[in-house]
Amino acid sequence: RVSIAKNNLSFPQDVQDQLKLAIGAVFRGWMGDRAIKYREVENIRNLLGTAVNVQAMVFGNMGDSSGTGVCFTRDPNNGENTLFGEFLINAQGEDVVAGIRTPKPISELDDAMPDVYAEFKSNTDILEKHYGDMQDVEFTFQEGKLYMLQTRTGKRGGEAAVKIAVDLVEEGFVTKEEAVLKVLPEHLDQLLHPRFADVESKEYQSSVMASGLPASPGAAVGRLAFTNEKVVENKKDGIPSIMVRDETSPDDVEGMYGSEGILTARGGMTSHAAVVARGWGRPCICGCNSISVDEEKGELTVTMEDGTMKVFKEGDFISLNGNTGEVLDGKQLVAPPAISGDLKTFMDTVDEIRTVDVLANADTPNDAKEARKNGANGIGLCRTEHMFFQPERISKVRQLILGDEGQQESALDELLIYQREDFEGIFKEMDGLPVTIRLLDPPLHEFLPSLEDEEIVSDLAKQLGSTIDELKDQIKESEEVNPMLGLRGCRLGITKPAVIEMQTRAIIEAALNAIDAGVDAKADIMVPLVGKVEEFRVQAALIRSVAAKVFEERGQKCDFKIGTMIEIPRAALTAHEIAQEADFFSFGSNDLTQMTFGYSRDDVGSFLPTYLEKGILLDDPFVTIDTEGVGQLIKMTVENGRKVKPSLKIGVCGEHGGDPRSVKFFCNEAGLSYVSCSPFRVPIALLAAAQAAVTKD
């Protein structure tokens, strides 16, 4: 009525006109801002449009023998095999999902209308058996007669997704392969996110201010935000947000997606906020009656248990426990989850099905330990430069770059000790699994201090026995116009062989030390940024000569392999030549993408949003592999490399190794031996690899 009056329209009286307008409204909604944003978030593409179903209306608001409800055939929070839903007597469906009235749990329908409940329960069993999955059902009963309005696969949180998949196999509803497809990578991501460390502690308990309905599980800590715009602004600035509303609506999609968690004063377990939050893995608390939200003032007022009021303003920190429904004051301590129970069972199934290995990018013994705990089959990338960033180590690297010959030798001797110790720790954590160690890759100037950092420059000048002005001149001379294409990778190793000699000695000595300690050390040494086979030959010869020297000194030997990163287009084009010399390939997909597109990954943000908006790019190529361009180089490399060496081990160790869509390409189209990713994304990559195996033609 408001819309009709505002636009000076008259409501059509002819039912055919009403029907045409209603159908047109659905079609127009396809290109509405909310629909576009939803498809963007859910990665829904290449659809021509939507369809409209026209069906007879049934009414749940015709008295006490009528009603409506929404129900999941299993609990979408924890996966328990019990009905999870709500209903209202004398109401229409919108009243349940909009949070206008607080509904009753579905179990009470058995008392209110036992015949309707019995028929409904029977129907849900039929639907779940037919579809082989948990269902989200909407229903209405009109004057005692039940109508099943719609059913669809129910959205669920990570814990529920894993339990449902495991239970469906045990109940004989689905095969293991089918079950693996029912868990999304995002579901595992939710389970891998931290939870609150100790909910029984006095500190935690004393911070609880209010409680509501635990609508979506998980722990969230962030600053209060009351609008979509504030959440988006915070996200751009790297600030975590808790979105707080009286109740949410589809207009809040962008803010809900960008937030760490959602808190509403009204609504039930199947309200808009609850369903959307569960689907996206956002912790959510709904129906928190003890809070009052003033969105205009940007204030949240909490009525404490003793009746006092506490006011929070936009930007204040609060924490949400989506498992218990508790709202807490301030920033609560969180702890990482562990793979156990149903998740362990599910991941065992994943391991049975996948056909490629999943390794981890790890630079320290602690990283390696985490990777192995998460199921990694080895280390696919150990970035040796990351071992240099502690204060006492980086000063030695700076001495190596800027010092005289004697100072350089002294720095190398000390760096050798650090590197050997780290490598030995990694070999011990990865006992029996391969460890791929990349030799120094970045430009040396990245280790140098900023000229504006007077204190560090002054200390370094004293360390080197030079004046501040002399040191500043040296630092300026070390700068390059385009360092990403300058003195780095194998070019650095060829022009400064002493660095590679030190690193090789550290690797081989660490492997021998680990073997002496009873560890099965498997060292793979990787030469970075090779563009010509001659570059690889020079570096490989140096590595072998240092290894031979160490073997002679120690009177013992160990196996090791020498391979290269394929990250320059020329290396991809001449893979047949490099394969004759190398023991393995690993795609540095970040640099390969950068050099193939000609995009600087450090500056791509200045135009990438426009490219995505205009459809020039469908994805950020540094997140999801560009299959049409970079992907073709990868496939060409694999094909030509294996023509020379059919059993050549080839993997990928860029950021794409943890992206599920990229993993599917690497497994099913490129034919890689392994993918490597962050230790915390290993389970997600494992799942993606298993799903790729199931869906492979």
Image (cartoon, rainbow, N blue to C red):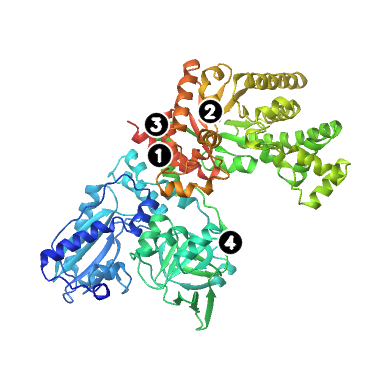
Residue wearing tag 2: 569
Q: Give the percent coordinates (x, y) of residue 427.
A: 64, 33
Q: Comparing marks 4 and 1, which lies closer to the viewer?
A: 4
Q: Quadrant of the N terminus?
A: bottom left
Residue wearing tag 4: 333
Q: What is the distance, in whole Å, between disc 3 and disc 1 at their CAs?
A: 19 Å
Residue wearing tag 1: 349
| Residue 591 visible to the viewer | yes
Q: Comparing marks 4 and 3, which lies closer to the viewer?
A: 3
Q: Is residue 104 above or below residue 462?
A: below
Q: Give the percent coordinates (x, y) of residue 485.
A: 63, 33
Which numbered circle lies on residue 668? 3
Name the amino acid type tagged 2.
Pro
| Residue 321 visible to the viewer | no
Name the amino acid type tagged 1.
Thr
Name the amino acid type tagged 4.
Leu
Q: Comparing marks 3 and 2, which lies closer to the viewer?
A: 2
